[in-house]
Image: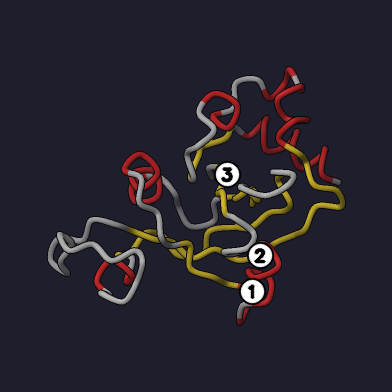
Amino acid sequence: MNYWLFKSEPDEYSLSDLKDEPGQVGRWDGIRNYQARNFLRDQVGKGDGVLFYHSACKIPAIVGTARVVRTAYPDPAQFDPESKYFDLKATAENPRWFCVDIQWQSEFTRPVALKEIKQNPALAGMVLVKQGRLSIQPITADEWRTLKQLGS
């Protein structure tokens, strides 16, 4: 089992939105960064743990957890000319972008803010601290445990 941090702007798709989905399962789509796409396509596996991070908001923070329930498949938005994620170069035979399905697991008792993460020596090696803009990031089992503890 691997662990991941998935970033989303809460006004686009929040942890509450995921919780409100039928079966509390939602499609994690719209990834248009090649490094994040490669993680999603090649490494994110069924059953993997996900820390749900709210970004581009007043207080960026990890707010809860989810788990991967369906591995990578072609993101349908890349084929839809009406979608903001449409990609003219993508074809059914050669998709460029992928998505996964995740299921809500828990909401943290208290959000773990980016500022707090940056100040915690146990979390200094996180991709979030070193390469903050990446929307899909691996985290270690120790980081997972530390962050879950901080959020409880």
Q: Earlier in the sequence, mark 2 or mark 3?
A: 3
Query: Contact, CB < 8 Å: mark 2 with mark 1?
Result: yes
Where does residue 54 sit, x and y in percent of width and height?
65, 51
Q: What element carries label 2?
A: strand
Instruction: From this view, report whether residue 67 is shown above or below residue 60.
Output: below
Where does residue 40 sit, x and y in percent of width and height?
40, 50
Give the CA separation, mark 3 to mark 1. Answer: 18 Å
In front of the other: 49 or 151: 151
Give the CA separation, mark 2 to mark 3. Answer: 14 Å
Left or right: 78 in relation to 51: left
Which residue appears at 74% of the width and 44% of the height? 59
In the picture, the quarter occupied by the N terminus is top right
Say which residue label 1 marks: 24
Which quarter of the picture shows residue 89? Answer: bottom left
For mark 1, does the 10 Å Cα neighbourhood hold few (<14), some (14 to 19), or many (20 or more) residues?
A: some
| Amino acid found under the numbered disc labelled 3 | Leu
Q: What element carries label 1?
A: helix
Which residue appears at 63% of the width and 69% of the height? 18
Which residue appears at 53% of the width and 59% of the height? 68
For mark 2, does the 10 Å Cα neighbourhood hold few (<14), some (14 to 19), or many (20 or more) residues?
A: many
Say which residue label 2 marks: 104
Report the disc number at residue 5: 3
| Amino acid found under the numbered disc labelled 1 | Gln
Give the CA separation, mark 2 to mark 1. Answer: 5 Å
Left or right: 16 in relation to 135: right
Which residue appears at 72% of the width and 21% of the height? 122
Left or right: 148 in relation to 85: right
